[in-house]
Image (spheres, rainbow, N blue to C red):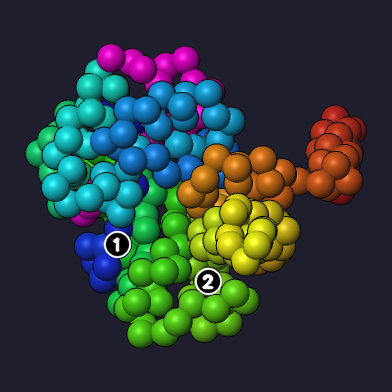
Amino acid sequence: MPDSIMASMGGLRSRLSVFLAAWVAVRYFYSRRAVLYVPGDDTRKLNKALSLDADCIVMDCEDGVASNRKEEARVTIRRWLDEGRTSTSTSEWSVRVNSVENALSGHMSGCQKINLIMYIESARAVLNLPHICRKIEQLSSTAPFKPAALVFGSDDLCASLGVTRSDDGTEILYARQKLVLVAKAFHLQAIDMVHINFQACASVQHSGQIVDLIPDLDGLRKQCEAGARMGYTGKQVIHPGQIPIVQQAFMPAPAIVEWAEGLIAAFQEHQKIGKNM
């Protein structure tokens, strides 16, 4: 079994505890800072991914696999899971499927519950996002999944809207912010968009010819920091070279960790002596 399954959401298709003092519902999550896609039909890349330090590695059956290779991807991923190939990895291993109907039909009946990570990538899905989350939450009481995160599918959304993706992303800013708002309202993680300019943003020229491509790591870092400020908890990654920057960007700053530890210690001390904060 994978740790999680990832599926696209359009329209309707598309460890809970309670902190009693504040009446706040809290979910216990896997950390999903860098969410790396690996084609499910490519055993060489899957083997390489075993040594990578991404929080979440996604065995892709969708965009990363050609239509005539999807069955091969399904067979390969199933074999990997059955053989326990991912058991030595510290990452969460997930499967990205083509549709909810294919992923969550009779094939999963009787299985233990797994995490459902939902892709929001169309105008209709953005418009219906609260309804989608509410319906999935209701279905999870009897279905073999539990909602865990929302993923912002920026480029498919641009296609749905008929707009051209820009570097600053102003044309999809509303949708990007709305996804965070709804994710937090339903106690879900929010995974930010892909940095699309990673591989071809700059080049070195020699005698008028391009001889190398320089990754735009500074642009990636800035986009990560902007997403973190919005409330995103992680980011989609399309190249192993992006992992270190993304993982670091979505780590709490040392000062924030120190403040949180101090707050917890003060709260526990006040509880011992019977005083409010």
Query: Could you tell me residue 253's position as x and y percent?
Result: 81, 46
Identity of the amino acid at label 2?
Answer: Arg
Q: Is residue 153 visible?
A: yes
Q: Is residue 33 left or right of residue 88?
A: right
Calculate the distance from the C-alpha at mark 1 to the C-alpha at mark 2. 15 Å
Disc 1 element: strand
Q: Residue at x 42, y 84 (%)?
A: 163
Query: Could you tell me residue 232's position as x and y percent?
Result: 60, 58
- Name the mark on residue 176: 2
Above/below status of 228 relative to 57: below
Q: Is residue 241 left or right of residue 50?
A: right
Identity of the amino acid at label 1?
Answer: Met
Q: Nearer the viewer, residue 102 or 215?
A: 215
Query: Could you tell me residue 134's position as x and y percent?
Result: 35, 62
Above/below status of 113 relative to 250: above
Q: Nearer the viewer, residue 260 or 32?
A: 32
The residue that disc 1 covers is: 9
Disc 2 element: helix
Q: Residue at x 33, y 15 (%)?
A: 84
**Magenta segment:** 83-99
